[in-house]
């Protein structure tokens, strides 16, 4: 997985609260972005279950991103961002 693919998928997610589907399950999520775009976070909760996805993303001056999952694997975070489909 290239960082560019993750970054592009994350950028498509609307800031604030939204709902959608991941792996056939409904999730509500909150995306927050700092004014300068360098500090970003996502918290998602399965609406009819117990699963959560939570992470911070930091964009450093070199153009690279630093992904910091919250007590879960980076693979889970990346899969969620790439495959989540927001409601239209």
Image (tube, helix red, strand yellow):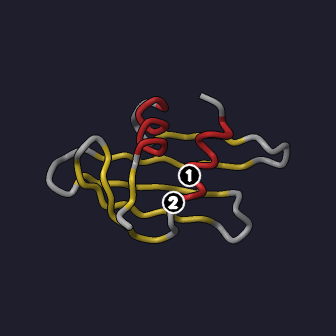
Q: Residue 66 appears in which quarter of the rendering?
A: top right
**Image location of residue 79, percent across then percent down:** 44, 36
The answer to whether marks 2 and 1 mark residues whose Cβ atoms lie closer than 8 Å is yes
**Image location of residue 73, percent across then percent down:** 43, 30
**Image location of residue 26, percent across then percent down:** 24, 54
**Residue at the spot of label 2:** 13
Q: Residue at x 35, y 54 (%)?
A: 44
Q: Which dot marks residue 10?
A: 1
Query: Is 18 situated left or right of 65 in this image?
Result: left
Dot 2, how many residues are within 10 Å of its Cα: few (below 14), some (14-19), or many (20+)?
Answer: some
Dot 1, how many residues are within 10 Å of its Cα: few (below 14), some (14-19), or many (20+)?
Answer: many
Q: Which dot marks residue 23?
A: none
Q: Residue at x 40, y 34 (%)?
A: 72
Which quadrant holds the C terminus?
bottom left
Front in this rendered view, residue 35 or 18: 18
Q: CA distance from mark 2 to mark 1?
A: 5 Å
At numbered mark 1, what does the secondary structure look like: helix, strand or loop?
helix
Q: Residue at x 42, y 42 (%)?
A: 83
Which quadrant holds the N terminus?
top right
At numbered mark 2, what does the secondary structure look like: helix, strand or loop?
loop
Q: Residue at x 56, y 49 (%)?
A: 9
Please, which residue is most extreme toward the left here?
48
**Image location of residue 47, percent across then percent down:** 20, 57
In the image, residue 65 above or below residue 12: above
Count of numbered marks: 2
Query: Is 45 situated left or right of 88 in this image?
Result: left
Please, which residue is most extreme toward the front here?
88
Front in this rendered view, residue 3 or 51: 3
Please, which residue is most extreme toward the right here?
62
């Amino acid at each position: 997985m290239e960082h560019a693919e993750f970054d592009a998928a994350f950028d498509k997610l609307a800031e604030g609260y939204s709902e959608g589907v991941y792996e056939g399950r409904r999730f509500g999520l909150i995306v927050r972005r700092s004014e300068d775009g360098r500090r970003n976070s996502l918290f998602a909760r399965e609406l009819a279950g117990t699963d959560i996805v939570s992470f911070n993303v930091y964009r450093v001056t070199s153009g690279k991103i630093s992904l910091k999952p919250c007590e879960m694997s980076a693979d889970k975070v990346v899969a969620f961002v790439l495959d989540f489909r927001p409601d239209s």
